[in-house]
Amino acid sequence: MGSWWPNLEDLYESNVPVYRFIQRPGDLVWLNTGTVHWVQAIGWCNNIAWNYKLAVERYEWNKLQSVKSIVPMIHLSWNMARNIKVSDHRLFEMIK
């Protein structure tokens, strides 16, 4: 719930796998859906970490748990509806 910056020693002591690396220009990092991750930029970066369907599901779960979402889904959905042409019917229905 919310932002979380874990204590690395706690993760190591609990045998939680931790992968640390520097992403260089041109590198692509792929994480599967639901992977707990955190990013610390040491320069400028582009981040594409989006799956609309899962974001909506998480938004609804957060509402049920009384947790404020870090992604403003209603605002985002209205902006998508206003500003982009959606040709994928499933995405159109989700936004609607």
Image: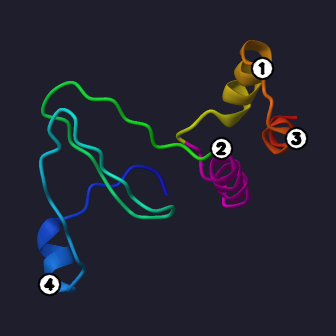
Neighbourhood count class around disc 4 (C-alpha, 10 Å): few under 14, some 14–19, many 20 upward: few
**Between discs 2 and 4, the one toward the N terminus:** 4
Determine the secondary structure under disc 3: helix
Task: Name the residue beneath numbered marker 1.
Answer: 85
Residue 46: which quarter of the image?
top left
State the separation of the CA atoms marked 2 and 3: 12 Å
**Which numbered circle lies on residue 13?**
4
Residue range in magenta is 52-69
Residue 50 coordinates in the image, percent (x, y): 53, 43
Predominant secondary structure in magenta?
helix
Task: Name the residue beneath numbered marker 2.
Answer: 52
What amino acid is found at the position of numbered circle 1 in the picture? Answer: Lys
37 is higher (above) or lower (below) than 96: below
**Between discs 1 and 3, the one toward the N terminus:** 1
What amino acid is found at the position of numbered circle 3 in the picture? Answer: Glu
> Residue drawn at (22%, 35%), measured in percent from left and top?
26
Position of 58 compared to 2: left or right? right
Q: Pick the quarter of the image with the C terminus.
A: top right
> Residue drawn at (78%, 14%), measured in percent from left and top?
82
> Residue drawn at (42%, 64%), measured in percent from left and top?
35
73 is higher (above) or lower (below) than 63: above
Task: Name the residue beneath numbered marker 3.
Answer: 93
Determine the secondary structure under disc 4: helix
Q: Nearer the viewer, mark 2 or mark 1?
A: 1
